[in-house]
Image (cartoon, rainbow, N blue to C red):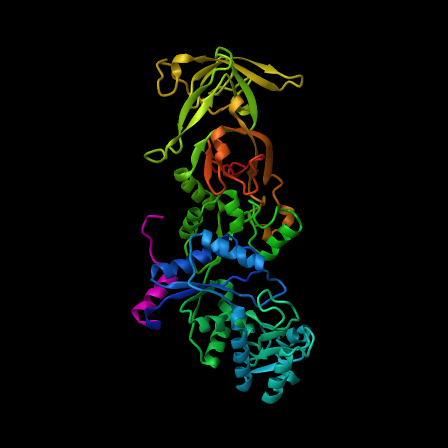
Amino acid sequence: MSEERSLNFIEEIVEEDIREGKHGGRVLTRFPPEPNGYLHIGHAKSICLNFGLALKYGGQTNLRFDDTNPVKEDVEYVDSIKEDVKWLGFTWAKELYASDYFDQLYAFAVELIRQGLAYVDDSTPEQIAAQKGTPTEPGTGNEYRNRSIEENLRLFEEMKAGKYPDGAKVLRAKIDLASPNMHLRDPLMYRIKHAHHHRTGDQWCIYPMYDFAHGESDAIEEITHSVCTLEFIPHRPLYEWFIEKLGIFPSKQYEFARLNLNYTVMSKRKLLQLVDEKYVDGWDDPRMPTISGLRRRGYTPASIRDFCERIGIAKRENMIDVGLLEFCIREDLNKTAWRRMAVLDPIKLVITDYPEGKTEVFTGENNPEVEDGEGSRDIPFSRELWIEREDFMEEPPKKFFRLAVGNMVRLKSAYIVKCEGFKKDDNGNVTEVYCTHIAESRSGNDTSGINVKGTIHWVSVPDAKTVEVRLYDRLFRVEDPSSEEGDFKDYINPESLHILPQAYIEPDLANAVPGKGYQFIRKGYFTLDKNSTPDKLVFNRTVTLKDGWVKK
């Protein structure tokens, strides 16, 4: 966005810190995803914020994977996250992993035990939950809370050595069982998991909890501004408690409102359900809100960055209309997408007075929205053309300015034609439309003096390429499927995908490449699917030319 905007509250904090010389005026942020799924549009907001802050204030951003739960994590997710961040246009200073710090985190835990601020607890998860009390009732201690420092050090070392099975013991911080903040009621620091880790292998069988690993990792890296979403506000006192007791670098946590987008779900757990239960074709299904899904659908990095800029950074949760995201991609593609003709629901138009076997070549601009048109391409023209079925009506209503018997229209970039008749099959479906052409009406050299109100697109039959076109729409039919009664999957939009197996494109589109946007004239914006082959081209609809959802 080009217009000036006021600072968001995090930028105000950063500028105040710089003025005061805090951290030597240095700005170092981090983007810390857990590699247990693919990134979605909500993560894009966090990426744009963290990297954007660093870029604006001459700082840097680390990409740090929060890989403390080996059961759910995978190298596939690590690779996809790196690809997404790069695709959005950002470069990280260092690629780091919480697992890089496992030795240091273990040493931190030992230090807290030595201070009498952590203990090994043999209670079951159910017992621990009960002993924590309720928001209105304080928790109660147990016999393990009074273990000696020496015993805790020995037991924690035995946990690390693999002496105990999963769930047999945990390490807890010793804080305040009467705290009104439930997160301070002796939170878990370590649990036993005999699981193979994607980076450390079988070296460890105890793994730190998020609340213990996160702030300490920030401190180890000397992160100046640790930005996260609002649900971590209750976690902040614990973040600060660990840093204070360990006497390490004072990283500071700041919270902003996460992105909630209507007509979709943003929970990784629910997105994984959609993938595992085959409601969608993988994490990068073009209906998914994942960055890889948006990329496959034809969204551009610029459109997503623009969207994140427009929604801004706030302190209060709200629901963002997906129509704004669609507006951003239309704005971008209108300036960058090459114009091409494609007929999605074809019937044949025959120009009866045009010589058989004759071919002409017309010229079309690639993009009339820019000054030089970004060059042009040749469009072959012949006696037989494919046109859209909706562009002919046997009994048209008033103000129908396309083809009907007696009506005239301009064929885009070519001639004016007049409809003389049509042909039906045995089922009553129109199969061919017959026209004559006005030879003096050639585009760019029209001397006919005839003005027509309608222009339609077309593809020359002998030159057309056959392709599959996938028309994508919103995945859910209700604004907030997660808040509806019952299973969120009950609200999947049955019209979210229509496959047109036999559409026709002008021959130049056979050279289309994935990632490039094309406007199919009058039909919408499309991109070549990544799984296309030379023998079978598949185009995905990115977005319609106008927002038709409101009318629905």
Is there any visible trace of residue 141 in the rendered image? no
Residue 532 versus residue 124 in the image, above or below: above
Residue 256 is situated, as x and y percent measured from the top left of the image, at: 45, 61
Asked if residue 11 is among those painted magenta in the image, a careful observer would answer yes
Asked if residue 144 is positioned above or below residue 350 in the image, the reply reads: below
Residue 270 is covered by the magenta coloring: no
Query: Which span is picked out in magenta?
Result: 1-22
Q: Is residue 69 visible?
A: yes
Foreground pick, 472 / 441: 441
Q: Write the residue at 68% across / 73% down.
A: 166
- Asked whether, in this view, residue 11 is left or right of residue 275, the answer is left
Q: Is residue 428 above or below residue 141?
A: above
Say which of 59 and 544 sits in front. Answer: 59
Is 306 in front, or is 206? 206
What is the x, y in percent for residue 209?
57, 71
The quadrant of the picture occupied by the C terminus is top right
Total numbered labels placed on residues in the image? 0
Residue name at image x 70 percent, y 75 percent? 165
Where does residue 175 sit, x and y in percent of width and height?
54, 80
Against 416, residue 16 (above or below) is below
Q: Position of residue 5 (x, y in %)?
A: 33, 53
The residue at the point 43 percent across, 46 percent down is 303
